Amino acid sequence: MAAGERVLLLGQSGSGKSTLLAMLCGTVPVQSGQVHVAGQDLAQMSGAARDRLRAEQIGVIFQQFNLLPFGSVLDNILLPLSFAPARRAKVKDPRGTAAALCEALGLPVAILSKQAAKLSVGQQQRVAVARALIGAPQVIVADEPTSALDADTQAAFLDLLFDQVAQTKAGLLMVSHDARLADRFDRVVHLSDIAVSTQEAL
Amino acid sequence: MIFRLALASLLARFVTVLMTVIAIAFSVALFLGVEKVRTGAKASFADTISGTDLIVGARSGSVQLLLYSVFRIGNATNNITWESYQDIIARPEVDWAVPISLGDSHRQFRVMGTTSDFFTHYKYRQGQGLALQGGALMDDLYDAVIGADVAAALGYKVDSPIVVAHGIASFTEHDDQPFRVSGILEKTGTPVDRTVIVSLAAIEAIHVDWKSGAKSGVVTPVEVIREMDLTPNAITAAMVGVKSPLQTFKLQRAINEYREEPLLAILPGVALQELWSIVGIAETALLAVSVMVVVTALIGLMAAQFASLNERRREMAILRAMGARPWVVFALLLLESVVIAFVGAVLGIALLYAGLIIAQPWIDAAYGLWLPIHAPGLQEGLVIGGVMLASAIVSAVPAVRAYRLSLADGMNVRI
């Protein structure tokens, strides 16, 4: 993936999309092949270095958004900075940055002090995006973030996501099983193709 | 922020956490309560007699002398002659002396002959003196002052008649010379509560017609007895106070080396310690049981942690996805346990103090056991620290499991 590139990873349920994402993020070890993130080979790195790389370079958006329900919106947005000193250093005013992200994502600033469990699904989704974007990581990894949305909302959400990712010049790797989204991405990778090509190689 | 989130996570599981906190609180309260009772009992025991410098009796063992003279358990092997007693109290070191004469009983309670000085000089619980809850001290030859337990057990009131039995567990009674309860003492938590106190002269009086431990057959009229010289020939023991504490050992040595008859002078505090060391095993057993209660509560904490692990895998996976190292997950669980243990222990101490404030007068009245209330100190601090440390150790087991789960789950949220 090039910097700022938007890649869609398509595949059926159970095809290994989430496992591939976990490998890219360095939480599942690679048994064969190579994974390079920001120019570094994950297989050559220690567990601590992979965790640090993930904290510093990758923003994750989960399928179910996965906010910490007991924390405030602000706590959730700032959470990645706790494990990423360099990313933290880029954010001079954490609260102000979180507020700006909320505004850009169409959330009222007052939501920052609200408990995450009390948000609507749409609000949770935007907070999850804000959490991935804080401190401008190089790659945003999104695991089927639109699966729970209807078509209109899906389009609006992607607009918002693309807009924000473009501003930070981050690469976007999004996983989906919805082929209709393909037009909106720079590149589309079909996981079934990879499986087939792997079979052929064997 | 991680610490704050950990606290928020705890609060989100409020009911489960509260149950665990309560279990720890009760166990800590019980542990410290047992400890209080143990030290209270020890202090009460040590305070059975205070302010008396020496106890003098016929030569035997120091614990035996203490047992029969103070606790009214067992019997003296021999008596002290009145002449020897006079010799001792004539010594310059002696400030005061109270003779006591034991041997008779009333129902299951011992009868003790003494002088009115007993009520002045007998002190317990750090110098507290005896007080009457009703009536007056002995005025007549046949007056008796009874302890609180005697009055309660036998339903005696002031003016109730008392017939003293000869010896202990004897069927022969001094029924020709009945006594009258002149006063009832306040509860002290000491053997005095179970004692019938009469004058030294009264002990002589009821034995006027007795020769060699049996009734002689002669019945001397009470009016005649009242006119007789009732100075005893012998006493069982004596409590002695010295003018200066520095003279205690000198007097003790002098009595122990007394040539006229073999005597023994003991320091009550030392003998009490010796006696307590014999019952120390029960003390250790009590402590062991209360420690087990705390251990059980901590195992409960571990079980609760294990039970919560599954529902918290999502939380751990989120943290891992954000870049948290697996040890952060481990540390968070450990920290959580330590916080629960701290809150539980502090609450337990609060419970203990509340319990003490409420129950202290009742325990004192019912058992004569005085449980002092002191400000929390080193002991409470050590208990809090110990419980926190122990909780960290027991929760290391679920924390290791969480660590492994977070390694296996990675950032995949499995619930």
Image (cartoon, coloured by chain):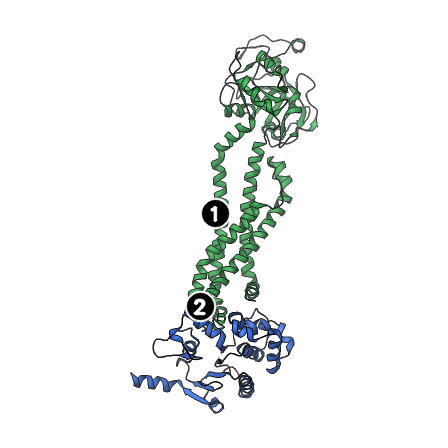
Residue B406, disc:
2
Q: Chain of mark 1?
A: B
Residue B384 x %, y %: 55, 50
Q: Nearer the viewer, residue B52 or B187?
A: B52
Q: Considering depth in this image, is B250 or B72 the residue closer to the camera?
A: B250
Residue at image point 36% right, 85% down:
A194
Q: Secondary structure at mark 1?
A: helix
Distance Cα–Cα, label 1 vs label 2: 33 Å
Q: Amino acid at mark 2?
A: Ser
Between disc 1 and disc 2, whose residue precedes? 1
Report x, y in % for residue B377. Answer: 59, 45
Q: Residue furthest left?
A: A202
Q: Quadrant of residue B38?
A: top right
Could you tell me which quadrant the C terminus of chain A lies in? bottom left
Query: Residue B107, percent across and down?
Result: 57, 24
Q: Which numbered disc covers residue B243?
A: none
Dot 1: within a 10 Å radius of its alpha carbon, few (fewer than 14), some, or many (20 or more) residues? few
Q: Is residue B257 visible?
A: yes
Give the SS element for disc 2: helix
Mark in front: 1 vs 2: 2
In the picture, the disc for residue B292 is 1
For the N terminus of chain A, give its image quadrant. Answer: bottom left
Q: Chain of mark 2?
A: B
Q: Are marks 1 and 2 on the same chain?
A: yes
Nearer to us in this view, B339 or B356: B339
Of residues B324 and B277, the one nearer the viewer is B324
* Few, some or many residues within 10 Å of mark 2 (<14, 14–19, 20+): many
Asked if residue A113 lies left or right of residue B257, the reply is right
Q: Which lettered chain is shown in blue?
A: A
Shown colour of chain B: green
Q: Is residue B171 visible?
A: no
